[in-house]
Amino acid sequence: MILENLKEAPKDPILSLSAACKLDSNPNKVDLGIGVYRDEQGITPVMEAIKLAEARLLEAQTTKAYVGLAGNEAFNQSMIELMLGDNSSKSRAVGVQTPGASGALRMLADVIKASAPDATVWLSDLSYANHAPIMQTAGLTVRYFPYFDRNTKLVQTDAMMASLKEAGPNDVVLLHGCCHNPTGADLSFDGWQTITEMAVQQGFLPFIDMAYQGFGDGMEADAKGFRYLAERVESYVLTGSCSKNFGLYRERTGIAVIAAKTLAQSNRIKTRILEAARSSYTMPPDHGAELVNIILNDETLKVNWLNEVEQMRLRVDHLRNRLATVLREKSGHSHYDFIAQHKGMFSVLGISPLEAQTLSEKYSIYLVGSGRINIAGMQENHIDYIAESLLSL
Ligand SMILES: Cc1ncc(COP(=O)(O)O)c(C=O)c1O
C-alpha cells in the first residue's frame, strides 16, 4: 500500500541540537547551533522598524485577496534596489518574490533544470547545508570546488580557481554573496574579480546566494563583490533573504532575481519561474514582503532599519573579536585568530565532529558537527566559559 513503506526521515541535526539544548538544565548552557541572530538577552527580537511598519499595515490594509504569482512587485523592485544599488545590470534585472531565499534557490534550480537538464551546479566545500539537497531535488548534478582551507580557516582561493577552470557553459557556480555559511570565510574582492573574469571567459552561470547583506562589513560594502561581477557577466541569478537583516525569519520573505543578456530575455525567464511557482506553492506569503516594502520606501523607517542592522552587525563583530582575544590570552597562541577575520554570524572552528559532540555533551555548548558556531548565539558573559571549554579539548 502507498505510504506504508516509508521510513522516518533522518532528523535535522541543527533542530535536534536546539531541542537538546532546551532540555539541558546546566545553567552555563549555550546554544551556538541554530542560525538566528540573538541579542545580549538571548532573544531574536522583532525589529523596531518592523513593528512600526506592522502598525501602518494594520491600519491601511483593506484586503487579503491574492496578490499574484510574482508576489509584491513593489517589494521586488525595492529589493533589487537594495541589493544592486546603482549597478548597471539593474536595467536588465527582474525579480520574483519567493518564500524566503530557500524558495528562490529552488525556483531558480527548477528553471536551470528546465533550460539545461544536465547542468552541473558547483558548490563550495563547505556550503550551506541545504544547497545540495535543493539542487539535487530539482534534478541537478552537484560538484564541489575547494573553498575552506582547514589549516588556515580562510578561503583557499588558488585551489578554488584552479578547480573552477573546468566549469564551462553548462555549469553553474554558486557563490555566497557575503558572510559565508557555514565557514565565515569570505572571498576577497580580488577573488570576486578573478571569478568574474573566469565567468566571462568560460561562460558558466554565476548563481549568487545573498542571505546576510548587512552582517559582514555593512549594507553597501557587503554587496561590493557581487555587484562587480553583476556589471560584467552576460547573465546571473541571485537570491535575497529578508530573514536575517529584517528579522523576518518565519514570515518567509525572499526574492529570486534574474539578469539575462536583455530585459526581454529576463522577463521571458521570469515567466518560467512563475510557472514553477504555480505548480508548487503558487504564491508567496505577503505579510513580510509588504513590511519590507513599507520600510524601504519610507525615508525615516529606512534610516531606523539600517541603524538596527548596523547595531546587530557591530554586536556580532564585537563578540568575534572578544572571543578571538580571550582565546589568544588564555592559550598564549594565535591559533584562533581567524575567528576575528571571519564575517557574518558564523565561523567554522576546525574541530572534529567528536570534539563538537564533547562540547555539547560535557560542557553544554551546543554546536553542529561541522564545528560551525553561531557567534550571534553568544552573550558577553559566555565568552570565558566557551574559550576555556574549547581549549580543554
Ligand atoms: C546561505 C543561505 N542561503 C539561504 C538561506 C535561506 O534563508 P531563508 O529561506 O530563511 O530566506 C540561508 C538560511 O540560513 C542561508 O544561510
Image (spheres, grey):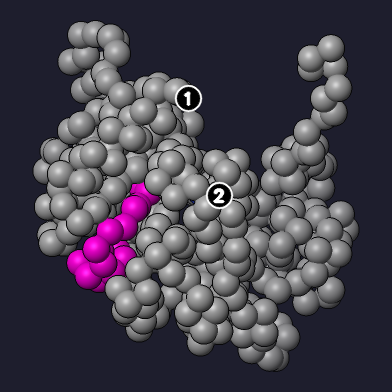
Residue in the picture at 72% in, 41% down: 12
Image quadrant holding the N terminus, namely top right
Image quadrant holding the C terminus, namely bottom right
Above or below 289: residue 377: below
| Whole-number angstrom distance, CA of label 1 to CA of label 2 | 18 Å
Between 290 and 393, the one nearer to me in the picture: 290
Magenta stretch containing residue 304, yes or no?
Answer: no
The amino acid marked with disc number 1 is Ser
Residue 349, position as x, y percentages in the image: 67, 71
Above or below 324: residue 229: above
The disc placed on residue 280 is 1
Residue 157, position as x, y percentages in the image: 49, 83
Can residue 390 be seen here? The reply is yes
- The span picked out in magenta is 223-242
Residue in the picture at 48% in, 31% down: 250
The disc placed on residue 140 is 2
Residue in the picture at 37% in, 39% down: 254
Residue 286, position as x, y percentages in the image: 33, 24
Q: Secondary structure at mark 1?
A: loop
Residue in the picture at 40% in, 65% down: 169
Residue 136, position as x, y percentages in the image: 60, 47
Image position of 332 (left or right of 128): right
The amino acid marked with disc number 2 is Leu
